[in-house]
């Protein structure tokens, strides 16, 4: 459904890294007020459920070895256990740079397929992981959102960043089985996002030692 045409452009990862506070300001407005304008059934997004559901879909299509899927579902539980209680809010949950659009001197979020109620932690981690923010930028992002993030918040964010990257990789694995799009190489994208996931996981586990 098209509501209006916006004459502008999607951001790149470089754009987000250069001006992430502006995106965070937009997220703050979304999380703080969007839900008040919604009616009807309330969608929910919980990435750990998504990971388990993707694993079942991939297993049914014999898309990956069973040992790999068992590792992913076990990891989903560990990452979920690292989360901390946060207010429920309505989020976007697919913050690829291309889904952040600049037009008319302001930013817009497009592609709300995964929009739903959850916590702010996923949008923050998703934004950081998809844009490739460096550790110091992650810390600044957390400080901008939480003022003085404690170790539990930092740990929950790092875990959610791993989960976000794994979700992107497993989405692509499902795509290998069930989706076709001109010019899209799902197998290559799976490999690319898995490599980013493994790097984030290694950093998360190193920090936990």
Image: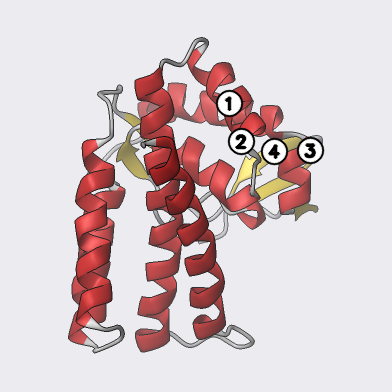
Q: Which residue is painted at 41% across and 15% down in the image?
A: 150
> Looking at the image, is mark 4 or mark 1 earlier in the sequence?
4
Q: Nearer the viewer, mark 2 or mark 4?
A: 2
What residue would you read off at disc 3? 18
* Disc sitting over residue 33 in the figure: none
Q: Real-space Cα distance between discs 3 and 2?
A: 15 Å
Give the number of the mark in front: 3 or 1.
1
Mark 2 touches mark 4? (CB < 8 Å):
no
Tell me whether the residue at label 4 lies in contact with that at label 1, contact meaning CB atoms closer than 8 angstroms: no
Give the quadrant of residue 44. Answer: top left
Closest to the observer: 1 or 19? Answer: 19
Badge 2 marks a residue whose secondary structure is: helix
Among the two numbered marks 2 and 4 on one chain, the one whose residue lies closer to the N terminus: 4
Q: Residues within 10 Å of mark 1 (few under 14, many from 20)?
A: some
Q: Which mark is residue 107?
A: 4
Alpha carbon distance from label 3 to label 1: 15 Å
- The residue identified by callout 2 is 135
């Amino acid at each position: 459904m098209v509501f209006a045409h916006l004459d502008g452009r999607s951001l790149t990862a470089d754009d987000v890294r250069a001006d992430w506070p502006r995106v965070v300001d937009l997220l703050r407005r979304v999380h703080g007020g969007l839900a008040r304008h919604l009616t009807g059934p309330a969608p929910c997004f919980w990435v750990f459920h998504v990971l388990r559901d993707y694993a079942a879909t991939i297993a049914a299509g014999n898309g990956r070895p069973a040992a790999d899927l068992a590792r992913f579902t076990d990891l989903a539980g560990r990452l979920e256990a690292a989360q901390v209680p946060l207010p429920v809010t309505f989020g976007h949950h697919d913050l690829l740079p291309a889904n952040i659009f600049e037009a008319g001197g302001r930013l817009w979020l497009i592609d709300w397929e995964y929009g739903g109620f959850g916590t702010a932690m996923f949008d923050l981690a998703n934004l950081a992981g998809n844009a490739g923010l460096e550790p110091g930028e992650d810390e600044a992002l957390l400080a901008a959102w939480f003022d003085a993030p404690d170790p539990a918040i930092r740990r929950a964010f790092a875990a959610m960043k791993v989960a976000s990257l794994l979700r992107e990789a497993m989405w692509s694995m499902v795509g290998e089985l069930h989706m076709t799009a001109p010019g899209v190489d799902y197998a290559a994208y799976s490999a690319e996002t898995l490599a980013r996931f493994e790097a984030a996981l290694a950093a998360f586990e190193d920090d936990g030692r």
